[in-house]
Image (cartoon, helix red, strand yellow):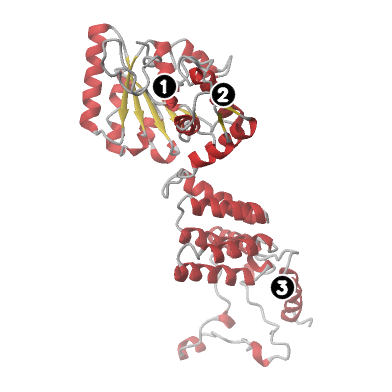
Amino acid sequence: MSLFGDPGAADDGAVAGDGTKAPPARPLAERMRPRTLDEYLGQDALVGEGRALRQAIEHGVAGSLLLYGPPGVGKTTLALLIAQHADLHFQPFSAVLSGVAQVREAVAEAVARRERERRGTLLFVDEIHRFNKAQQDAFLPHVERGDIVLVGATTENPSFSINGALLSRCRVVPLQPLADEHVESLVRAALGDRERGLGVRGLRIGAEAVARLAALAGGDARRALVCIDACAATCLDGDEITAEAIVEAFQHRVLQHDKDGDLHFDLLSALHKSLRNSDVQAAVYWLVRALEAGCDPRHASRRLLAVAAEDVGLADPMALQVATVCVQAVQVLGMPEGRLPLVEAAVYLAAAPKSNAVVRAIEAATAAVRKGAQHPVPLHLRNTVSALARDLGHGAGYVYAHDTAAGVAAMQCLPDGLQGARFFVPGERGFEQRIAERMRENDQRRRGDG
């Protein structure tokens, strides 16, 4: 049997030559797993001809790696190919089901195998991000001594999910979702392969159906092949798999989402940046995509509130009110009705004029406070609550603004060392144009020119 198992496993319900029932066939996604680097699709930037990682794998010196990417892009397959080229025993290990005791047991077996067979071990840890710091630390001495080659697979950003000591000993290899063309190529290969795929059944798929399948798979090869497997189970030999059958097979699919993971924040980030860029259509799409994937609507409403304050700002003062009402409406209505105020607020915010003048004002004032001198409060602005304070000159020269004709006193309010400083600089969009006019008028009055 090869490293990848027996590609000619019998079909479900088949009867072996001795009259016994053959074991069930492995899933199509497992049978079609690439057996060579040439069959490995979608990661040419990493393992294409002439790439450094490919050369290292082919020479059996890839070393310990952390494979980082979404589901179904080939993390396990790449680990298998690394083991194959380096003639290492492939030992799969699940971070979900195992702990430190199992780590020690696996390493002990690897050490014994090296002494017994003169053969190293590649320990493949799926979902390595699920190990805590202590569990991750258990690998360190064994990686350093060369007891094992460690290849971890994670869907979470290693910078946040893997401790620094382990990161420093492993190369991070980022894998990308497969392009639609690669998914389509894989599907057609599975339908045509008579040895490992469904070629003996003569099934066909049209351009529209395979394009729809690639779009629904979202760069996940496993998901695409699972769908084809499901469609094949309801087809007669020689049938054509239609776009309708593809949609039916996908109708109960679960969109990728993890409330504490990268994708959750990536979806909210896409929503925020689409709103900031005034793209109504993209904002609605990313909002609905996040909600359909299971994002807490309260998280989405809070992101809209942040956009109103941070990106719309005073260019449209109504934006903050709209977003605040949206937060309240979502809490009162719940789902699915809460989608209405969410989308309404998203459309309003995306279409609104944008300004980050308030953000820049905060940054400028913060820099002045933290880096500048501790300027004393001018005497005329100080508190006059006590007789002693008044005797010390607090409040002397203060002019009550409401007593002036224009409602603005010709009085200095910034410390002497900051006269003329400009923290808030209004933009030229939306309501901030009017704010700029008012500021100019009030500046003149404070100088006594108005």
- The reply, left or right, for residue 361 in relation to residue 52 is right
Image location of residue 100, percent across then percent down: 23, 32
Relative to 52, residue 294 above or below:
below
Looking at marks 2 and 1 on the same chain, the residue that comes earlier in the sequence is marked by 1
Q: Quadrant of the N terminus?
A: top left
Q: CA distance from mark 2 to mark 1?
A: 25 Å
Which of discs 3 and 1 lies nearer the camera? The answer is 1
Q: Residue at x 47, y 26 (%)?
A: 74
Q: Which mark is residue 251?
A: none
Q: Which amino acid is tagged 2?
A: Arg
Q: Which mark is residue 79?
A: 1
Looking at marks 3 and 1 on the same chain, the residue that comes earlier in the sequence is marked by 1
Q: CA distance from mark 3 to mark 2?
A: 62 Å
Figure quadrant of residue 428: bottom right
Looking at marks 3 and 2 on the same chain, the residue that comes earlier in the sequence is marked by 2
* Other-residue count near label 2 (Cα within 10 Å), few / some / many at <14 / 14–19 / ≥20: some
Which of discs 2 and 1 lies nearer the camera? The answer is 2
Q: CA distance from mark 3 to mark 1?
A: 60 Å
Relative to 185, residue 6 above or below:
above
Q: Are marks 3 and 2 in contact (CB under 8 Å)?
A: no
Q: Quadrant of the C terminus?
A: bottom right
Relative to 162, residue 275 above or below:
below
- The reply, left or right, for residue 186 in relation to residue 436 is left
In the image, farthest residue toward the right? 449
Which of discs 3 and 2 lies nearer the camera? The answer is 2
The residue carrying mark 3 is 435
Q: Which mark is residue 188?
A: 2
Residue 215 visible: no
**Could you say which is closer to the camera, residue 141 or residue 229?**
229
Q: Residue at x 47, y 19 (%)?
A: 34
